[in-house]
Image (cartoon, rainbow, N blue to C red):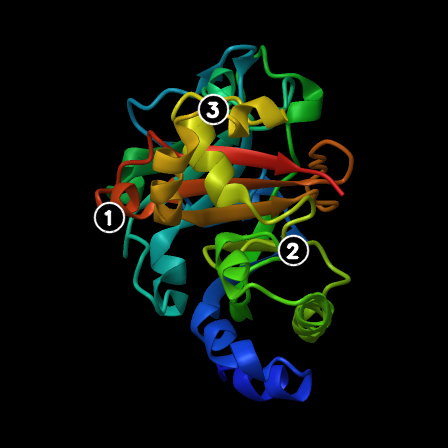
């Protein structure tokens, strides 16, 4: 994958003052493109979006507060490890992503925890079993299967993120940076659904998701301004940089997924939890345009 010449892009857009900061913020991402496929065509543990998951023997289908959760994606780490240039993902094993598609929690506060699950399993494929959805799972939470094709893409932080806030853009620099984000998106195909593993998010309602995850996971309700006014915020925000995006899933036509009003769901995890392979503290944010 050729590295995007962000320094040159920035200078050509009158962003010379912050060109080095922008270049330092560039992150590799693994783009996921979906193609409709029949569930029976998948080998056990192969990466897929929707369909029926292959769960390790003894692992139950996750339940949320509203009953069985929708199965979102199954990602085999061996299929993507060569694209993980930063080596932040486990080199083997299978990640399963679930979401309570009935309640569609936004991730605004502590009460939303339990509205999603990420399972990590490792073992021989013969230890996994294709698992049909539980009878109580609604039809709108049973997504069609799609194959997952992976490729590398460079990503830049969205406006409103911790990284861009530290750049302290002037008004003209803000618009110049937005133009650069749009050009980068066009380069990789912005007219498609944008699903990605790691990297910067394609935010639709502001890029402050790291802070949102940090505050909400520590007991504050950030669904209104009162949560940000809590006296604990300054101390808690010091840990916001620990959060990195694990998975971004778009409203996906091929699978029938619809998050809010054509929105996206973002699974976030702290770097130290990912290093420990602890996926129990993952936080999710739902955003709509």
Q: CA distance from mark 2 to mark 3?
A: 34 Å
Mark 1 or 3 closer to N-term? Answer: 3
Foreground pick, 102 / 219: 219
Question: Compared with residue 41, is residue 56 higher up or lower down, i.e. above or below?
Answer: above
Residue tagged by mark 1? 275
In the rendered image, which residue does mark 2 sit on?
Answer: 194
Specify which label sits upstream in the sequence, 2 or 3: 2
Bin the neighbour count of mark 3 within 10 Å (Cα to Cα): few under 14, some 14-19, many 20 and up: few
Pair 2/1: label in front: 1
**210 lies above or below 178:** above
Q: Which residue is mark 3?
A: 230
Residue 226 sits in quarter: top right
Q: Residue at x 42, y 21 (%)?
A: 219
Q: Secondary structure at mark 3?
A: loop
Q: Tell me what residue is drawn at x 21 percent, y 43 percent.
A: 276
Residue 58: x, y in percent? 28, 22
Q: Quadrant of residue 94?
A: top left
Q: Position of residue 62 (x, y in %)?
A: 43, 20
The answer to whether the residues at label 2 and label 3 have Cβ atoms under 8 Å apart is: no
The mark nearer the N terminus, 2 or 1, is 2
Q: Please, what secondary structure does the residue beneath circle 1 have?
A: helix
**Which sits in the foreground, 267 or 35?**
267
**Which quarter of the rendering shows the C terminus?**
top right
Cα separation, mark 2 vs mark 1, equals: 26 Å
Q: Which residue is painted at 39% across and 50% down in the image?
A: 76
* Contact between labelled residues 1 and 2, with CB atoms less than 8 Å apart: no
Which residue is outermost to the left?
276
Whole-percent x and y of residue 248? 55, 47
For residue 137, side relative to residue 176 (left or right): left
């Amino acid at each position: 994958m050729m590295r995007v010449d962000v320094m040159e892009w920035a200078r050509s857009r009158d962003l010379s003052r912050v060109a080095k900061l922008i270049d330092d913020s560039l992150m590799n991402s693994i783009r996921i493109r979906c193609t409709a496929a029949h569930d029976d065509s998948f080998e056990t543990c192969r990466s897929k979006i929707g369909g029926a998951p292959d769960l390790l023997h003894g692992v139950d289908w996750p339940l949320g507060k509203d009953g069985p959760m929708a199965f979102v994606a199954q990602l085999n780490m061996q299929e993507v490890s060569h694209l993980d240039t930063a080596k932040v993902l486990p080199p083997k094993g299978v990640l399963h992503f679930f979401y309570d598609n009935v309640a569609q929690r936004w991730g605004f506060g502590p009460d939303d925890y339990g509205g999603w699950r990420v399972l990590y399993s490792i073992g021989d494929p013969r230890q996994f079993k294709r698992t049909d959805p539980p009878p109580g799972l609604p039809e709108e939470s049973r997504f069609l299967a799609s194959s997952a094709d992976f490729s590398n893409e460079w990503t830049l932080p969205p406006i409103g993120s911790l990284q861009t806030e530290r750049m302290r853009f002037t008004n003209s620099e803000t618009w110049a940076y937005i133009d650069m984000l749009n050009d980068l998106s066009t380069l990789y195909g912005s007219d498609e659904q944008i699903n990605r593993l790691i990297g910067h998010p394609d935010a639709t309602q502001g890029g402050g998701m790291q802070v949102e995850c940090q505050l909400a996971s520590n007991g504050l309700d950030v669904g209104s301004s009162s949560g940000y006014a809590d006296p604990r915020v300054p101390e808690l925000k010091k840990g916001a940089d620990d959060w990195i995006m694990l998975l971004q899933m778009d409203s996906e036509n091929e699978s029938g997924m619809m998050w809010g009003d054509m929105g996206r769901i973002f699974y976030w995890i702290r770097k130290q939890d990912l290093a420990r392979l602890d996926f129990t503290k993952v936080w999710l944010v739902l955003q709509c345009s």
